[in-house]
Amino acid sequence: MQALLLQCLSFPLTLLIVFLLARNGASLSYADFALVQGIVACAMTRLRGLAVWWLGIQLVFPLALTGALKLDIPPLLFLGLFLFLLALYWSTFRTQVPYYPSGKWVWNEVDQLLPKDKPLLVIDIGSGLGGFTLDMARRRPESVFVGIELAPLPWLLSFLRARLSASRARFVRGDYDNLDLSNYDAVFAYLSPAAMSGLWSKASKEMRPGSILLSYEFLITEKTPDIILMPTGRGAPLYGWHF
Ligand SMILES: C[S@@+](CC[C@H](N)C(=O)[O-])C[C@H]1O[C@@H](n2cnc3c(N)ncnc32)[C@H](O)[C@@H]1O
C-alpha cells in the first residue's frame, strides 16, 4: 500500500519535472515520462525507508505499465487477473500472511504429537486450500478438524474439496481473530513472522489448560516453545506450546 501511495505521490512531481524539461526545449516520450516517474518514486521509496527490493519494483513499474499498454491487452484480462488475485490473497496487505501450503512432512509430526486417547477438536487458523485439515480428518476419524480461512477463493476450494471427498473436515470463512480459542484442544498455525506476536497475545489469554498451540516454521519470540521438532525429510521446525 505504501509503495502504491508513493507511486501516486510521485506523479505530480513527475509532471512538474516533465513540464520544466519541456519548457526548456526537451521533447519527451511516454517512455521518458515513465522513466522519470520511476526515478522519482524510487527516490521517495528510499526516503521512506522501505525494504531495498522495493526500489527495483518502483523504478520498473511505470515503464512496465506503459509497455503493457502498448501490447493492447484487453482490459477485461487485467480485471480478471486482479479479481483472481484479490480472491486468493484478500487482505494479505493487512494480515501479512499470504497463502503457501504446508505438507505431509509436518502433518506427520502433528499426528504424532496430538494425543490419541481421546477425541479432539482441532483448528487450523488460516487453512488455505485445506490440505492440513483434510489430511488430519482422514487420519483421525474420532476427532473433529476445522479450518478457518479469510480469503474467499482458498476457502471455497477447501469447502468443495471436503464436499467432493465426503470428508468430515469443516471449513469456515472468517478471521481467526474473531474466534474463541478456548473451544479447541489444539490450534495449528502456519502464518508468518508478522502474525506471531498477535497470535501469542490471543492464545495466552484464551487457550485453556491442557490444550496445545502448534506453529509450523514461525516462532513466537515472547515465549520459549515447549516442543521443537524437525520434521523428517524436509521442511522447517514445528514449534509447540502447552497451556
Ligand atoms: C501460509 S497459509 C497456510 C495454509 C494452511 N494452513 C496449510 O498449512 O497449508 C496461511 C493462510 O492463512 C490465511 N489467513 C491469514 N490471516 C488470516 C486470518 N486472520 N484469519 C483467517 N485466515 C487467515 C491466509 O489467507 C492463508 O491462506
Image: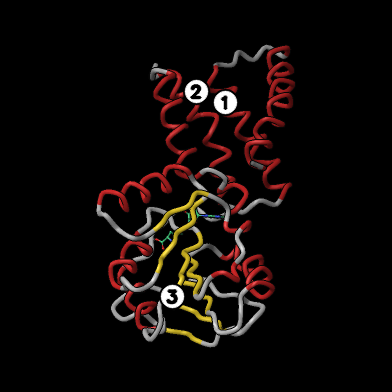
- Mark in front: 2 vs 3: 3
Q: Is residue 172 left or right of residue 41?
A: left
Q: In this orientation, which residue lies closer to the viewer: 210 or 95?
A: 210
User: In the structure shown, which secondary structural element does the residue marked by tag 1 occupy?
Assistant: helix
Q: Which residue is mark 3?
A: 120
Q: Is residue 65 left or right of residue 10?
A: left
Q: Which residue is mark 2?
A: 66
Alpha carbon distance from label 2 to label 3:
56 Å
Q: Which residue is mark 1?
A: 34
Count of numbered circles on the image: 3
At 58% across and 39% down in the image, what residue appears? 58
Instruction: Mark 2 or mark 3: name the one nearer the start of the chain.
Output: 2
Alpha carbon distance from label 2 to label 1:
7 Å
Residue kind at label 2, given as amino acid type:
Thr
Confirm or deny contact between disc 2 and disc 1 (CB under 8 A): yes
Residue kind at label 3, given as amino acid type:
Leu
Q: Position of residue 93 (x, y in %)?
A: 59, 47
At 54% across and 42% down in the image, what residue appears? 57
Q: Is residue 95 left or right of residue 136?
A: right
Instruction: Mark 2 or mark 1: name the one nearer the start of the chain.
Output: 1
The quadrant in which residue 224 appears is: bottom right
Snapshot colouring: secondary structure
Cβ of mark 3 under 8 A from ligand 1: no
Instruction: Mark 3 or mark 1: name the one nearer the start of the chain.
Output: 1
The quadrant in which residue 180 appears is: bottom right
User: In the structure shown, which secondary structural element does the residue marked by tag 3 occupy?
Assistant: loop
Q: Position of residue 160 (x, y in %)?
A: 33, 46
- Local crowd size for mark 3, using a 10 Å CA cut-off: few (<14), some (14–19), many (≥20): some
